[in-house]
Amino acid sequence: MSQLKFITRYASIENPLDIEAYLAQGGFSGLREALTMSPKEVISAVKQSGLRGRGGAGFPTGVKWESVRGDTERYVVCNADEGEPGTFKDRYILEHTPYLVLEGMAIAAYAIGAQLGYIYVRGEYPHIVTALSNSIALSEKLGYLGTRILGSDFSFHVEVRKGGGSYVVGDETALLNSLMGNRGYPLLKPPFPTEKGLWGKPTVVNNVETLAYVPYIFMHGATTFASIGHPESPGLKLYSLSGHVAKPGVYEFPMGTTVGELLQAAGGTRGPLKAVQIGGTAGPIYDTSALGYALDFASMRKVGGALGSGALVFMNTSVSMVQVLDVTMRFFAEESCGQCFPCRYGTRQLAFMAHKIASGQGKLEYLDFMRDIARVMVGASLCPFGQSIALPLETILGGFGDEIVSFIKQQEFLKEVAV
Amino acid sequence: MKDVTLKINGNSITVPSGTSIYMAAEKAGISIPSLCRHEDLEPKGACGMCIVQIQGQPGFKRSCVTPVEEGMEVFTTTAAIRDIRRGILELVLATHPADCLQCIKHGKCELQTLAERFEIRALRYDRYTRDLPVDASSFGIVRDMNKCIGCGRCVQVCNEVQTVASIFFHGRGSNTIVSPAYGSSMGQSVCVNCGQCVVYCPVGALYEREAIEEVWKAIDDPQKIVVAQIAPSVRVAIGEEFGLAPGELTIGKLYSALRALGIDVVFDTNFSADLTIMEEATEFLQRLKGAGPFPLITSCSPGWIKFGETFFPDLLENVSSCKSPQQMMGALIKTYYVESRGIDRESIVSLSIMPCTAKKYEASRPEMNSSGSRDVDYVLTTREIARMIRQVGIDFANLPEGDPDPLLSRYTGAATIFGASGGVMEAALRTAYEMATGKTLEKVDFTEVRGMAGVKEAEIDVGGTPIKVAVTNGLGNARKLLERVEADKKAGHSSYHFIEIMACAGGCVGGGGQPIPNTLARRASRIEGLYREDRGLPFRKSHLNPEIKGLYAEYLGTPGSERAHALLHTHYTKREQYMVVPT
Amino acid sequence: MNPTNWGNTHHRNPQSSTKRDTLLSVLHSVQSPQRGKTWITDKDLSSIAREYKIPIAELDGIVSFYTLFSRAPRGRHVIRLCDSLSCRICGSLDIYRHIRKRLGISRGMTTGDGLFTLEIVNCLGACSTAPNMMIDDQLVSGVSLKEIDDLIDRLSKEGI
């Protein structure tokens, strides 16, 4: 049993809803093991494993679980509002290995003392909403979810909720807000959801992939997980590769695999490689020098970037960085929630300027203006969404500045600036 | 809770635990700029202007929502902070129409003030505006969303304070706009016209629907006789528009000012406040005799009336049938007054000067025409009349004390306290007591029902009967109280005999038409001014008003008479709260 | 002093005794592609507002926040074309221009026969098969322009 392939192994089960097939491959044995431990011991194991949130923020999962305090009414919420462009690993997990997520949620609920869990699935994955309800029903039938799980005193019910279409709702406080039936506004932290989350009760929000890796810790041991990859960012990771690459798709590799190694596994680029965006639209864009970058939270931080969701979008030399700037700034403007001034107004101005540049009406001073706006947004945005615009903007202007400057100077315009 | 000592800009200050950095700085004499924060409202952290730097913590923190901590070292203004604040202002100004000169808030706009403070001399960014039509569909309030900066104060006031919820954020990102439901306008929505959104809006996006030009026209028309009435709350607030202190009584100057404007006849709504008490105390005693329905609920706040019609239609039978003082006066002007002077009713323009935007709505209600035409033709808010006075160039603060015209202007202390929350209740008790017992009421002050608290309760002995009363101000508080009343009603009993409801916090002194800043602190000062006047007046009980006695003797007969009912009483209409466009 | 949510339906407000976590699901169900109704009418809004005891302005505010809901009438079939980075560099604009020409509408518009509404959306989470779009609840991935034409033909034949 290779311990370097976990999720992808379960994903190869032909019928994802077949719970017997899941069980036959050791499914729910992690939960069984966790239930022999005390909740405190479970949290300790997750801490020891070094598992960090796989949604993008990379917060240590065990520490998050440990920080739950206060009311005895508690919740576990699975963040399945995958919206980071270039990222499709959560879709992959939910389509192919839903039971892993349910098992992870059950372990989390046991650890923090939650009775009810929600899976918030983005509205653009409606088939997953249906399939998940079926998986939950099947799990309950066999006693892996529901009342008195596996004959223990622990009960945990899971319900599925559908999102309405909003990227920013992927932020954990915005997600809880949306789950409560409100506009998806992120909320100021503190208070943290682990103290005051859903309806003011302690809530743990974890990404799909994070929860899918939790059973690993109890099947193969925390130290095993911790020994893979980078010591500060260990374990396995699902990387989403797309763009101008020969074999786009989901690749499971140890944390710290380099960009080049992944590219090789995916058959190399289609056309000469020009740039790669790491971690999604809120992630840095690098030229070919990034091939040697190790893809884990700690190493990416060290080079001034971020791993984010682990998405990799490869761009060949046919791609104009002005186009990338235009598409990226437009994304932020369309997805800003609009609650705070810096982001509501800043993203709009940035999108204007990027679009003006792309339409052949750019001015050199726009580049300075854009940097200024980014500084305002980093300093005064209410939530990480607004702050995250700096990474893509700075890396495009920094790494590909010459291309953009000459584009502006020559008053070029992109043929394809239609939308 | 312990006190906390921290350093702000190098200076030590001690504040109670739980204080925000913003408030601590204010205590230390430092005014941190903000566009969305208001001292009366809960901070939401929308604008980002109030950011500060804290030693040992990375980045910037919003001082409005960050509590102080022992030993904190805060810097409220560094080069980086100034840079970000200017950046935010530039971004906001780039979306804001550049027509300050034509804007109603020119000179009083918080955005203008900050732009000036930060010396934004030029805009680097391309301007973009919304090009939205102005929504003037409501009688009381105009919405110009082109100027909205999205601070959210109006949303907070309407939804969380007043619990009317006629407007909310719509859309997302920079397309976010504040509006009623899509397809509906302000006039079609559940908006009660209380105008609290107007008094908290920092810019010119929300303002009163003005009647100034129409009133000038009437004044300039030699065929028209303009007859004005002035609400109690105006006399302790209008001075603020001319540099005087909130609460300073300036009624004499106001009479003079109105004459200087060219208004022909000046009456006083306080007269009809006394009248309202006559009718309402009578109504109350009738209910006492006849066992209900209880509680009797006051009806002089049109914002409350529309709120009740919309959200508590089952309680409409409890509401007093009395009109508000404004409407009673309007009806009498076009009947009693014109008949007594032999004037043609058609030549009268009935004008009222009110602290209230909902009064504009009230005056337009279809049933408010018992005189045969509109009982009140135009309503001017305190702010509007102040503008007219300024337009003419009158030095208000130095005007001589003037007098009103006789017949419909004398008033007692009971009338003038109508502007304060609890004033109607107190006035009614003063008269009801003497009406019911036939004895003289020695202790005239009912302090239990006074003050800014949201709900005040008391039990008053009226000739052996304990009367349970409640007074509430602010519609959110009213809602809580009325939910209890409704529950009681379903259970077949009532906890109260008599309830006073005012839509605005503090009562009418905090109305949507009052001078801005219209903070809770100022409202409290205005209230004090009213009680001061009450204490100094020769008569403090409505039924002792000689002009009131004359009105009944010569014209109305007795309180509750047929003529009184025809002119001074009204009815209500159930309204739908969940329709996008009510049919 | 922790800032609470906007609206008078915060969890601690007694008015919100009904838990609103099912609200988005109900809004989805009202917009059911199976019944050919792809938007939320005034009547829908009123009845949901009444059921959940949410003020109508706030409910409309909630609806208008999310991309998937519409308060204005839309076509029988809603085409959502992704134009985020992976799809853009894999040819989303070619598809957009093709559909625009074929149906005669641009983004945000509905065909005169009421059959199709074309929307441009952000990442649909299927980037490995870019360019992507959704038609109603179906993901349509990495298809050729010819296959798109065939799909439109088939749906047009089915009619309203």
Image (spheres, coloured by chain):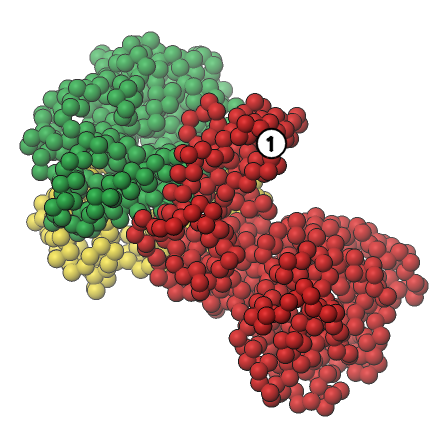
Chain colours: A green, B red, C yellow
Q: Is residue B73 visible?
A: yes
Q: Quadrant of the N terminus of chain B?
A: top right
Residue B317 in the image: above or below residue C45: below
Question: For the point 36% across and 35% down, which residue is it?
Answer: A378
- Residue B410 in which image quadrant: bottom right
On the image, the x and y values in percent for residue A137 come to: 37, 32
Residue at the extreme right of the image, as rendered: B439
In-image side of B356 versus B527 (left or right): left
Question: For the point 55% across and 72% down, which residue is it?
Answer: B211
A288 or B59: nearer the viewer: B59
B432 or B361: nearer the viewer: B361
A138 or A182: nearer the viewer: A182
In-image side of B71 versus C42 (left or right): right
Residue C151 in the image: above or below residue A62: below
The amino acid sitting under disc 1 is: Gly
* Label 1 crowd (10 A; few <14 / some 14-19 / many >=20): some
Q: Chain of mark 1?
A: B
Quickly name the residue at label 1: B18
Question: For the point 26% across and 33% down, which residue is it?
Answer: A394
On the image, the x and y values in percent for residue A416 come to: 13, 48
On the image, the x and y values in percent for residue B82 come to: 43, 38
Residue A165 in the image: above or below residue A67: below
Residue C99 in the image: above or below residue B440: above
Secondary structure under the numbered disc 1 in the rendered image: loop
Q: How many marks?
A: 1
Question: For the point 32% across and 28% down, which residue is it?
Answer: A55
- Residue B367 in which image quadrant: bottom right
